[in-house]
Image: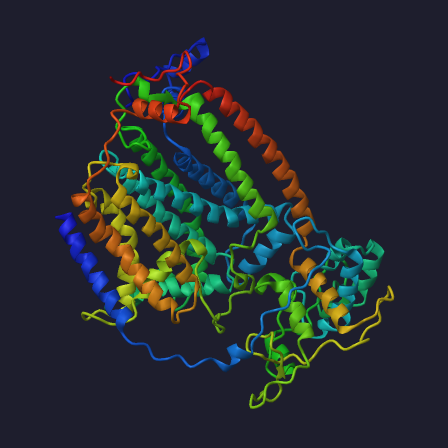
Amino acid sequence: MVRLIGMAIGAIFVFVLAWAALVPREAAAPDPVKLLHKEPREVSFAHSGPFGTFDRAQLQRGFAVYKQVCSACHGLYHIHFRNLEDIGFSEAEVKAIAAEYEVPAIDPNTGEAITRPAIPSDKWPRPFPNETAARAANNNAYPPDLSLIIKARKNGEAYVYSLLTGYGEEPPAGFEVPDGLNYNPYFHSVNIAMAQPLMVDQIEYADGTKATVDQMAKDVTAFLRWAAEPELERRRQAGIATLIFLAILTVLAWLSYRRVWAGVQH
Amino acid sequence: MSFPWAEQYEPKSPLMKWIDSRLPLPRLVFNAVGAGYPVPRNINIWYNFGVLAGVALMIQIITGIVLAMHYSAHVSTAFNSIEHIMRDVNSGWLIRYLHMNGASFFFIVVYIHIFRGLYYGSYKAPREVVWMLGVVILLLMMATAFMGYVLPWGQMSFWGAQVITSLFSAIPLVGEPIRQWLVGGFAPDNATITRFFSLHYILPFVILGVVILKIWALHIPGSTNPTGVDVKGPQDTLPFHPYFTAKDFVSLCIYLLAFATVTFFLPNALGHPDNYIPANPLSTPAHIVPEWYLLPFYAILRAFTVDLLFIEAKLWGVIAMFSSILLLLFLPWLDTSKVRSNAYRPLYRTFFWILVVDVLVLGYVGAMPAEEPYVRIGQIATMYYFAHFLIILPIVSAIEKPLPLPNSIAEAVLAKAQKLAPQATPAPGSAVAQPAE
């Protein structure tokens, strides 16, 4: 009985699916945006590969790019000033960087809303008080948080690097870029609200590195990788130790298994 | 219950005697996973995945309890509390990545365990209840994993919750009220995240309870084995401890090596980048996909694209998706072959491997956007899935001529040993039965 009912149900499913598979499809029109969209260009860093570690000088250059260029519109929502000690700044330097910014506070005497200089335990201040203000200032586009951007995009490092260096291409004839948007084939819709952010020699690196667009894009990408995964180096070190431990344990387990099973056929 | 030749528990010290006469817990352990549990001597590496699944469950429970100490179940704080765990909690990133990838590894292990059961006919009498409890565990795991994926409140969390709960609205008449009752509102919101957190915390313990029932049911007949032949005497078995504890420990080490490699070096490879974007009800992701372990069922859901027989396409998909798992409950009665192991069923073995490929194809299609040629491939693969269990399996088991079975496990073991080393004689002291001549 179970088999008869089962076969009947099976036959119904197969019939419905066969019908659905045989129904003719409307030819899908090729999406013009998809044809223009490009896969990100691969890029490699000191921290690439399973054993790579961050290049602190590069992270500090990337931080300079973020601070002087990106931070005008993009926040680093999950980064505190104190985290900057991770990329090689001293405690005093972090205090000095924090003190450049004002954060909202409450006057301890009157209870009124005031601002005070930031301290290392403060979060990085957001460029806009809220999404509405951000959209009002940016032609209705919302600049995303950058502290997770590398993890929040497929192939994140290559994506950010390609996007930053992907400006300047002429759109193909007949393709109209809407007003207020910019052509960038690495963006999912190929029209991006952000204007080209990096120009040659836009900033002056403290270590004298020549500030080409490519250099700045690489540096800020490395910095954002750190911002997204500050635990990356600790994670890899712990991983290597764990794997060595487990490899030895596996050998011991195998030897004891051989010993227990010696002379037993199975 | 066990085989009559099982070693009996005998407490040696006065303390153990004292305990045994009051709370015989050591006796229970001895009979369940100790020397008092005889196991077929020929079970192979694929039989280790049951133990691994138990370990994976315990890893999830332990890491989950720690995460719950730091997580905040509220729409305005859930996403940030995950980042707080990742950045500010000591070793929080490790606990969270272990839990995240632990779920994936739990499913890998359980899927291999299920296919092992299918290959060696582990669902057949007298182990039907063991198998059915396994199906219940699978359903509970899927519900738990789905609700856990919602908790970080990223984009895929929100939209996954939206898509999956909206499945219930396909039920005629009462569907929409049921959906609102489940979600606690018109769309996933704070009520959803708090109830999902509550259920996500309790369901693993329900799973643990069913696991105990399952082990209890398993210990009545004991494990199957690659020959599918019943255990006939002491020469067919070895005590669980030390033989299978030693063997399981090797496989556990290898499992942990794989798990650690992914957790430490590719922690986000199995996830979706969109879940690192905070949930936004006003912005739909380009492709909404569930976690990888639900993709085959997602493909079955989407394979139904036409309204037919007065049933909407969406409802067809929902019925088919639930049927695709529930039909496993009836497997012991759909397969009438007296032979358990596929090693002796050449015809059904071919279909088994087609099923394995078919499920992989379904998983691939589930990850792809709903456009040609993926839709059609998904429809054909879904067709095979249902045909395999509901039509091919009953017919094949009725017409198939199985290969001759060995008389006993011991005979099969001896034959294998002689094939490997023709001159070898059983080592003295080994408990291999002499072949019947």
Of B223 and A73, nearer the camera is B223
Q: Horizontal placement of A223 versus B270: left or right?
A: right
Q: In this view, does B228 lie above or below B156?
A: above
Residue at 39% over, 69% down: B370
Q: Horizontal placement of A69 versus B82: left or right?
A: right
Image quarter of residue B124: top left
In percent of width and height, residue A158 lies at 64, 65
Of B376 and A160, nearer the camera is B376
Q: Is residue B180 above or below residue B19?
A: below
In percent of width and height, residue B321 lies at 30, 58
In percent of width and height, residue A1 lies at 12, 48
Q: Horizontal placement of B16 versus A138: left or right?
A: left
In percent of width and height, residue A196 lies at 69, 79
Residue at 24% over, 31% down: B405
Image quarter hosting the C terminus of chain B: top left
- Whether residue B293 is visible to the viewer of this picture, yes or no, is yes
